[in-house]
């Protein structure tokens, strides 16, 4: 039986931000578990995506395909384990600034939260046109606000 001090942790490790090109097709982000399971020997968690909340927000169905309520459950383990979450990225033809959304980890049962619980995914635009016009000679960078 696991005691409170040896119950494992689950999270995204030290990952805070991931940047992908719009043409990548999908992004895969691992959820990491290490340590021991709780007394019942079962660990579960839910995860979901959320649109960004600032002026460069990526929108579900337009920039990526949402995960509304994924659930994962697994029996007691003592070795580290990884659960890859794959999110499709939509390659549109709009010239845009870099857009961002979040993958979050929630409702953890049988383990402690460890490391990062939210990861920001930045989508770099691969189109050109009026929406991405910048003054000649400048070198702009875009990111979450």
Image (cartoon, helix red, strand yellow):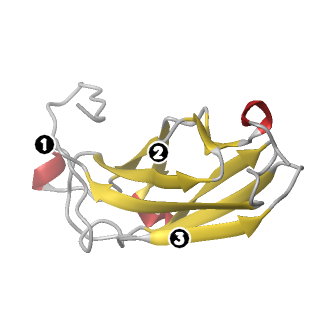
Indicate the quadrant containing the C terminus: top left, top right, bottom left or bottom right.
Answer: top left
Would you identify the image quadrant in which residue 62 lies? bottom left
Q: CA distance from mark 2 to mark 1?
A: 17 Å
Q: Which residue is mark 2?
A: 19
What mark, if any, has residue 55 been given in the picture? 1
Tell me what residue is drawn at x 35 percent, y 70 percent.
66
Mark with earlier residue (2, 1): 2
Evaluate whether residue 22 shows in this view. yes
Evaluate whether residue 25 shows in this view. no
The residue lying toward the viewer, choosing from 116 and 128, is 116
User: Where residue 64 sits: x, y (%)?
Assistant: 35, 67
User: Where residue 129 sits: x, y (%)?
Assistant: 17, 56
The single residue placed furthest to the top in the displayed view is 138
Q: Secondary structure at mark 1?
A: loop
Q: Which residue is mark 3?
A: 71
Q: Is residue 130 left or right of residue 101?
A: left
Mark 3 surroundings within 10 Å by alpha-carbon count, few (fewer than 14), some (14 through 19), many (20 or more) = few
Mark 1 surroundings within 10 Å by alpha-carbon count, few (fewer than 14), some (14 through 19), many (20 or more) = few
Tell me what residue is drawn at x 45 percent, y 53 percent.
106
Q: CA distance from mark 1 to mark 3?
A: 30 Å
Q: CA distance from mark 2 to mark 3?
A: 25 Å
Mark 2 surroundings within 10 Å by alpha-carbon count, few (fewer than 14), some (14 through 19), many (20 or more) = some
Tag 2–tag 1 contact (CB < 8 Å): no
């Amino acid at each position: 039986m696991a005691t409170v001090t040896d119950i494992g942790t689950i999270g995204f490790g030290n990952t805070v931000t991931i940047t992908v090109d719009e043409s990548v097709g999908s992004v895969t982000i691992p959820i990491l578990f290490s340590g021991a399971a709780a007394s019942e020997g079962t660990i579960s968690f839910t995860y979901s995506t959320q649109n960004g909340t600032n002026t460069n927000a990526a929108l579900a169905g337009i920039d990526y395909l949402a995960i509304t309520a994924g659930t994962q459950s697994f029996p007691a383990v003592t070795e580290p384990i990884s659960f890859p979450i794959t999110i499709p990225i939509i390659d549109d033809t709009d010239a845009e600034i870099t857009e961002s959304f979040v993958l979050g980890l929630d409702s953890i049962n049988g383990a402690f939260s460890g490391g990062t619980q939210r990861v920001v995914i930045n989508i770099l635009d691969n189109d050109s046109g009026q929406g991405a016009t910048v003054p000649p000679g400048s070198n702009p960078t875009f990111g979450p606000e």
